[in-house]
Amino acid sequence: MDGNGRWATARELPRILGHRAGAATVRQIVEGCCEIGISALTLYAFSWENWHRPSQEVRELMELLVEFLTGELDRLRANQIRLQAMGRLDHLPPEVREQLDRVMAATASHRRMILTLALSYGGRQELVDATRKIASLVQAGRLRPEQINEGLIAQHLYLPELPDPDLLIRTSGEQRLSNFLLWQISYCELYVTPTLWPDFTKQELLEAVRAYQHRERRFGNTSAALTNGQPRPTAE
Ligand code: FPP
């Protein structure tokens, strides 16, 4: 959800007002995803590297998150959306943890869409944490190194049940991955738009989905083989 800072700076506003405008966009886009039947939406709301931002911005972002979580429960209920979070959540302030736990518990039975907030999240950190869990199983004699395969690594990620994303939307024109879901996006389709996140609309969400629908996903195979109905490769 990139471009909040630039959106605010262009209006000579403090950066936090860009993040506030970004939170309003979150509401619109969550609603838009629900309306078109998206089953899982993951929002990169605060990266592991974002902890290095000036302490005032970090504090204001955490306050905004608490406000968002407090105010959003009714809407999540009304739309049957389940909220989850992924990342090094133990680094979040207690108030954020409390609100997250409360909203996650209250929405756990919802089935229409899974909304995941990546918070204090880094793709490399997720792989480090998964490796540590796997290494302790090997050390305890509960796993042999030759049993480690793609499926086992995937099972030790933060949210193993969450399907790999099909489409990644990057706003504000940045053409990089910024440590987001590095394992899960190996065959994800990318949609890069110059639009700053606060200006991103349901209309543009539809444009991104339409662009996705015209992609041919070959998963390393050839176009001809896929046309002949060969299945996509399975994890090893
Ligand atoms: C990146 O833009 C954005 C963030 C680090 C924070 C994103 C947070 C929100 C949209 C609001 C809170 C989240 C939820 C789920 C309600 P940037 O600040 O790096 O923008 P810039 O590149 O223009 O400076």
Image (cartoon, helix red, strand yellow):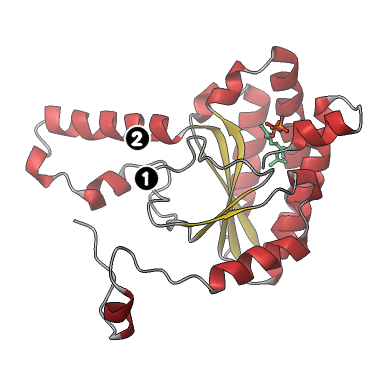
Q: Which residue is mark 1?
A: 183
For the C terminus, which image quadrant? bottom left
The answer to whether residue 79 of the structure is visible from this angle is: no
Residue 56, given in percent of the width and then of the height, sits at: 75, 15
Residue type, mark 1 in image:
Trp
Residue 142, given in percent of the width and then of the height, sits at: 12, 37
Helix, strand or loop status at disc 1: loop
Left or right for 225, reference 112:
left
Which one is in front, 37 or 178?
Answer: 178
Left or right for 65, reference 41:
right
Report the residue at 81% width, 47% height from top.
Answer: 24
Q: Residue furthest bottom?
A: 228
Residue type, mark 2 in image:
Leu
For the N terminus, which image quadrant? top right
Helix, strand or loop status at disc 2: helix
Which quadrant of the structure image shows residue 21?
A: top right
Q: Is residue 215 above or below residue 227?
A: above
Left or right for 103, reference 87:
right
Residue 228, given in percent of the width and then of the height, sits at: 28, 86
* For marks 1 and 2 on the same chain, the one whose residue lies earlier in the sequence: 2
Badge 2, how many Cα within 10 Å: few under 14, some, many 20+?
some
Report the residue at 60% width, 62% height from top.
Answer: 113
Residue 58, given in percent of the width and then of the height, sits at: 69, 21
Q: Is residue 213 above or below residue 90?
A: below
Report the residue at 63% width, 23% height from top.
Answer: 94
Q: How many marks?
A: 2
Q: Which residue is mark 2?
A: 127
CB atoms of marks 1 and 2 within 8 Å? yes
